[in-house]
Image (cartoon, rainbow, N blue to C red):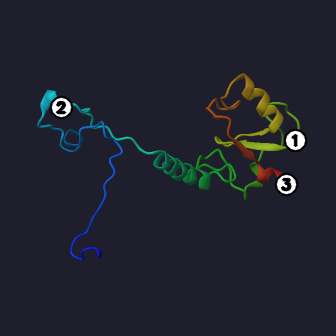
C-alpha cells in the first residue's frame, strides 16, 4: 500500500498535558471554572536555554576579563607594566603564584584563599568575588 501524495501527516507532542492550552495562549478558557486543566500562562526556559544564556553572558565578560581588565580605570592593561603591583596586598611580600580577581586586584593565591575562607568579598575593595580568580599572566610574564 502506497501512501497518498496529497496528504501530509504531522505529529505534535504535548509536553505539558496538564496545562490548559487555550488559557496559556489567549488568557481565556471557554470552560471557565469547570476546566479540569491548570490555568497557567507561565513560560520557563529549558535547561539548554539557561545554559546558552549563561554562556553568552559569561563569554562577553570573559572576553573583557582575560587578563583582569574589565573596563575600570583602576584596572590596568598588559602594556602598562609600570603600574602593576610588585607585592601582595595581604602578606606584603613578592607574589607567589599571583592571581587577579574579577575586580582587578592582585594577590598571592594562598593569601587570597585564606581570606576567602573568612569572607567572600575582595580584601581591597569589598566587592563580592564569588570565589572567581584567574592567574595574573601579566605579572607572571615580568
Total marks shown come to 3
- Mark 2, residue position: 35
Displayed quadrant of residue 17: top left
Specify the label residue 96 is tagged with.
1
- Looking at the image, residue 40 lies above or below residue 73: above
- Looking at the image, residue 128 lies above or below residue 98: above
- Mark 3, residue position: 142
Q: Is 42 left, or right, of 31 in this rendering?
A: right
Q: Can you tell which of label 1 and label 3 is closer to the viewer?
A: 1
Q: CA distance from mark 1 to mark 3?
A: 13 Å
Q: Is 69 left, or right, of 4 in this rendering?
A: right
Q: Contact, CB < 8 Å: mark 1 with mark 3?
A: no
Circle 2: element type: loop
Give whichever of 52, 30 is nearer the camera.
Answer: 30
Q: Can you tell which of label 2 and label 1 is closer to the viewer?
A: 2
Circle nearer the N terminus (1, 3) = 1
Amino acid at each position: 500500500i502506497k501512501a497518498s501524495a496529497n496528504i501530509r501527516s504531522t505529529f505534535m507532542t504535548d509536553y505539558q498535558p496538564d496545562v490548559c492550552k487555550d488559557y496559556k495562549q489567549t488568557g481565556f478558557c471557554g470552560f471557565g471554572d469547570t476546566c479540569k486543566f491548570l490555568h497557567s500562562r507561565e513560560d520557563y526556559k529549558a535547561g539548554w536555554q539557561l545554559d546558552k544564556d549563561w554562556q553568552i553572558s559569561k563569554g562577553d565578560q570573559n572576553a573583557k576579563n582575560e587578563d583582569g581588565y574589565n573596563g575600570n580605570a583602576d584596572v590596568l592593561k598588559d602594556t602598562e607594566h609600570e603600574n602593576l603591583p610588585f607585592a601582595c596586598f595581604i602578606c606584603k611580600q613578592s607574589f607567589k603564584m599571583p592571581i587577579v580577581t574579577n575586580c582587578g586586584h592582585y594577590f598571592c593565591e594562598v593569601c587570597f584563599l585564606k581570606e576567602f575562607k573568612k569572607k567572600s568579598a575582595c580584601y581591597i575593595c569589598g566587592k563580592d568575588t564569588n570565589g572567581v580568580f584567574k592567574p595574573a599572566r601579566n605579572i607572571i610574564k615580568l
